[in-house]
Structures are given as structure tokens and as C-alpha cells.
Amino acid sequence: WYCPFGPGNTTIQTPRGSQGETDWVFQTDLNLSYTVVESARGNVTASVDVFNLFDNDAATRVVEQGLIRTSGNVLTARSPYYGMPRGYQAPRSLRFGLKYTF
């Protein structure tokens, strides 16, 4: 893990995790199913799945680029976006199902 913040803008090695960490990701999923019809011919089961029940929105990705190019091909300025979230865990979603087994 290298960061170009050393003397004279040289690249120095930094320990993994020393430049920030993402949030803990917690997610609770729920499944409910009910057999609607039971017969000798087969069963019909209805179900619903809820993903991310409590709608948590932890950051899962952050901007890792610490410097930006301001003159030609040289990294010369600190990025104002360094460490800001780039992605979040998926929002709450539902899935409905109907299954026939014979």
C-alpha cells in the first residue's frame, strides 16, 4: 500500500488500514413461506424474501486516489474526494415467489 505523501512528494509505504477503513456492514434478511395448497397431486407454496430488512446503508467503497493530476501527467494536488464513499450496500428489496412441487 503506497501513498505519495513523503518528503518531496515521494512515494512511501503505509500499513494496510492506516489510511482509513470502510463502515461495518450489517444486513438482516428474512424469508417467509406458506404452503397454500397441499394435495396428492402436489403442493403450492407462496413465499416472500426481504433483503436488508432494516435498510442499512453502510459505505462499501471509498475513493482511494489521494492525489489528482493538475499539470500534465504529474500528481500534484490532494484530491478533495479522498476517503469519500463511492458505493453503498444495496437498499431494502423484496422478492415474491410461488412454487409448485409434485
Image: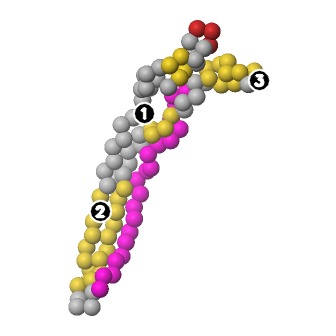
Say left or right for 72 vs 93: right
Residue 67: quadrant of the picture: top right
Depth check, mark 3 against mark 2: the one in front is 3
Say left or right for 68 vs 26: right
The residues tagged by marks 1 and 3 sit, at their Cα atoms, a distance apart of 32 Å
Question: Badge 1 is on which residue?
Answer: 22
Badge 1 local density, few (<14 within 10 Å), some, or many (20+)?
some
Residue for point 43% across, 26% down = 16
Residue for point 37% across, 72% down = 97
Depth check, mark 1 against mark 3: the one in front is 3
The residues tagged by marks 2 and 1 sit, at their Cα atoms, a distance apart of 28 Å
- The answer to whether one can see residue 97 in this image is yes
Residue 96: quadrant of the picture: bottom left
Residue 8 within the magenta-colored segment of the rendering: no
Residues shaded magenta: 81-102
Question: Badge 2 is on which residue?
Answer: 31
The residues tagged by marks 3 and 2 sit, at their Cα atoms, a distance apart of 55 Å
Q: Earlier in the sequence, mark 2 or mark 1?
A: 1
Q: Position of residue 83 (x, y in %)?
A: 51, 28
